[in-house]
Amino acid sequence: MEWVRAEVDTSNEKVRERVHSVFLDMSNVVNIDTSELVGLEEIHKELASLGIQMAIASLGWQAIQKMKLAHVVDRIGEDWIFLTVGEAVEGCLTAHKGSAMEC
């Protein structure tokens, strides 16, 4: 988050290079507990407050189930959870098609 905050502060001068999206590659996450769910929500809230979209990729099915049960998927947005990082990038590009945004 420190890097993202620094980039947001720096990019105010360079609008073209602004951070628009952050992709979390969670391929090594097999399971997730309550504190991690809360942490993901906090990261999502902070990124959203900075105008940055968060996408989650490569999350195991057990972790996705827990996120659904805790309604974290609802808050992040089902459209922003992907099976692979490649799909996450494609989703970002599709969502922002026609805008000047680069993912």
Image (tube, rainbow, N blue to C red):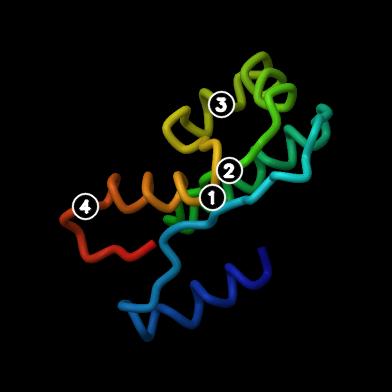
Please tell me the numbered disc located at residue 97.
Answer: 4
Q: Residue furthest left?
A: 98
Going from N to C along the chain, the mark reached first, 3 or 4, is 3
At label 1, which amino acid type do we have? Val
Q: Quadrant of the N terminus?
A: bottom right
Label 3 secondary element: helix
Q: Which residue is mark 2?
A: 57
Q: Which residue is mark 3?
A: 73
Q: Residues within 10 Å of mark 1 (few under 14, many from 20)?
A: some
24 lies left or right of 53: right
The mark that comes first in sequence, 2 or 4, is 2
Q: Is residue 54 left or right of residue 51?
A: right
Q: Earlier in the sequence, mark 2 or mark 3?
A: 2
Q: Are marks 2 and 4 in contact (CB under 8 Å)?
A: no
Q: Residues within 10 Å of mark 3 (few under 14, many from 20)?
A: some
Where is residue 95 drawn, in percent x and y? 29, 45
Which residue is found at the position 40% from the left and 72% from the top? 18
Report the residue that reaches farthest toward the top: 69
Residue mark closest to the camera, 4 vs 1: 1
Task: Provide residue 77's location: percent of width, then percent of height.
Answer: 47, 31
Circles 2, 3 touching at the beta carbon (< 8 Å) = no
The amino acid beneath tag 3 is Val
* Total tally of numbered discs in the picture: 4
Residue 85 tag number: 1
**Where 59 falls versus 62 (above or below)?**
below
CA gap, disc 3 and disc 1: 17 Å
What residue lies at 69% left-to-right and 45% top-to-bottom? 26
Query: As shown in the figure, which amino acid type bears the numbered disc 2?
Result: Ala
